[in-house]
Structure formats: C-alpha cells, structure tokens
Image (cartoon, rainbow, N blue to C red):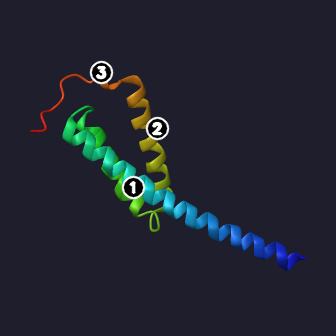
C-alpha cells in the first residue's frame, strides 16, 4: 500500500512542477505585455514598465533563479496592482501620442 501512496505523490509532484513552470511563463508574458503597454501609452510612469520587464526576465529564468523569480513575480503583481488601484486611468494625466 505504501508503493501506491508514493506513486500518487510522485504523480502530483510532477503535475505541480509543470503547473509552476507554466505559471511562471504566463507571468513573464503578462509582465512583458504590461510593460510594453505602459511604455507606449504613457498611462503610468516608465519605471513601472522597466520593473515589469525585469520581472518578466526573472520569470523566464525561473529554472536557474527560482526564489528571486518567484519573489519578483509577486512583487510585480503587488506593485502594479496597488498602483492601478490607487491611480486609475482617468487620473493618469496626459497620455503620450502613439502617432
């Protein structure tokens, strides 16, 4: 019976590692897209775009830098989310011209 429990544990561990891998890649895509949008439109400060690109690079490198990439991803979501809540789009000021 112990063999069955070990087999289920290994299966769940494998599924969890794949889920973590794809979540980090999804975070990288989201952060990079957010940075491009912020940089081109100017709706938020440019430092937020640079921060999101740094988080995206760390998320891609999550295999090598596991803990820093997880922390950077969480900090990006916290900082960007807090910034969007406290400063909505209407209060962002003058937008950059995209033409």
Q: CA distance from mark 3 to mark 2?
A: 21 Å
| Element assignment for label 1 | helix
Mark 2 vs mark 1: which is more N-terminal? 1
Dot 1 and dot 3 residues touching (CB under 8 Å): no
Please identify the quarter of the rendering in which residue 61 is found.
Answer: bottom left
Mark 1 is surrounded, within 10 Å at the Cα level, by few (under 14), some (14 to 19) or many (20 or more) other residues, namely many
Nearest to N terminus: mark 3 or mark 2: 2
Q: Position of residue 77 (x, y in %)?
A: 45, 41
Q: Residue furthest right?
A: 1
Residue in the picture at 42% in, 43% down: 76
What's the residue at 62%, 63% (across, down)? 16
C-alpha separation, residue under disc 2 versus residue under disc 1? 15 Å
Between circles 1 and 3, the one closer to the viewer is 3
Residue at the far left in the pictured view: 99
> What residue is pinned by disc 2?
78
> How many other residues sit within 10 Å of disc 2, few (<14), some (14-19) or many (≥20)?
few
Give the quarter of the image for residue 35: top left
Horizontal and vertical percent for residue 18?
56, 67
Residue at numbered disc 1: 28
């Amino acid at each position: 019976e112990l063999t069955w429990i070990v087999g289920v544990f290994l299966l769940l561990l494998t599924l969890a590692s794949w889920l973590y891998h794809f979540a980090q890649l999804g975070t990288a895509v989201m952060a990079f897209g957010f940075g491009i949008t912020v940089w081109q439109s100017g709706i938020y400060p440019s430092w937020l775009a640079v921060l999101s690109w740094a988080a995206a690079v760390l998320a891609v490198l999550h295999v090598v830098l596991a803990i820093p990439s997880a922390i950077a991803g969480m900090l990006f979501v916290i900082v960007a989310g807090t910034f969007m809540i406290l400063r909505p789009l209407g209060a962002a000021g003058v937008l950059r011209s995209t033409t």
